[in-house]
Image (cartoon, rainbow, N blue to C red):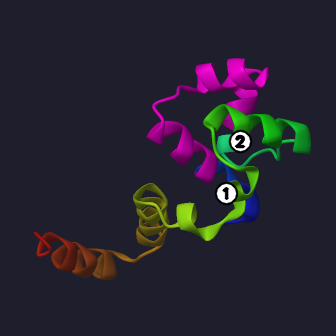
Amino acid sequence: MNDKELLGLKIRTIRKSKKITQEMLSEKVDISPRQIVKIEMGQAYPSLETLKNIAEALEVPIQSLFENDYYESSEILKEKIKRKIEGLDEKTTRFVYLVVSNLD
């Protein structure tokens, strides 16, 4: 996962944790909902001004968007696991399934 994707995932994680929709965030930040989608998907870097406005809208310090504590949220970990699993061969996928199915 590259830096743009991590930043986008972090913004999305914080936004969802605060029960704010992409549309609500776009209104607060005064950018289009499509731009929020691009930022959250790691397809675009926000400008510094937009980043500042996003942090204010989410009621978090701007530096928290770059700290590691949010990077290890369960949503991010699930995304990392999903990406790892997608690259596995069939035998390894079956083994991982057996391991995971026994975690209950």
Earlier sequence position, callout 1 versus callout 2: 2
Q: CA distance from mark 1 to mark 2?
A: 8 Å
From the top left corner, tell me how far across and down residue 52 is, in percent. Answer: 81, 41
Which quadrant holds residue 17?
top left
Look at the numbered disc 2 and give the secondary structure of its residue. Answer: helix
> Which residue in the structure is indicated by mark 1?
64
The quadrant where residue 41 appears: top right
- Residue beneath label 2, please? 55
- Name the image quarter holding the C terminus: bottom left
Q: Are marks 1 and 2 in contact (CB under 8 Å)?
A: yes
Amino acid bearing label 1: Ser
Point 80% across, 42% down: residue:
51
Residue positioned 67% across, 31% down in the render:
57
Judge whether 39 appears above or below 90 on screen. Answer: above
- Left or right: 21, with 88 as reference point: right
User: The magenta stretch spans which residues?
Assistant: 10-38
For the residue pair 38 and 93, the one nearer the viewer reads as 38
Q: Residue 54 location in percent, x, y?
A: 72, 37
Q: Amino acid at mark 2?
A: Ala
In the image, is residue 97 above or below residue 75? below
Q: Quadrant of the N terminus?
A: bottom right
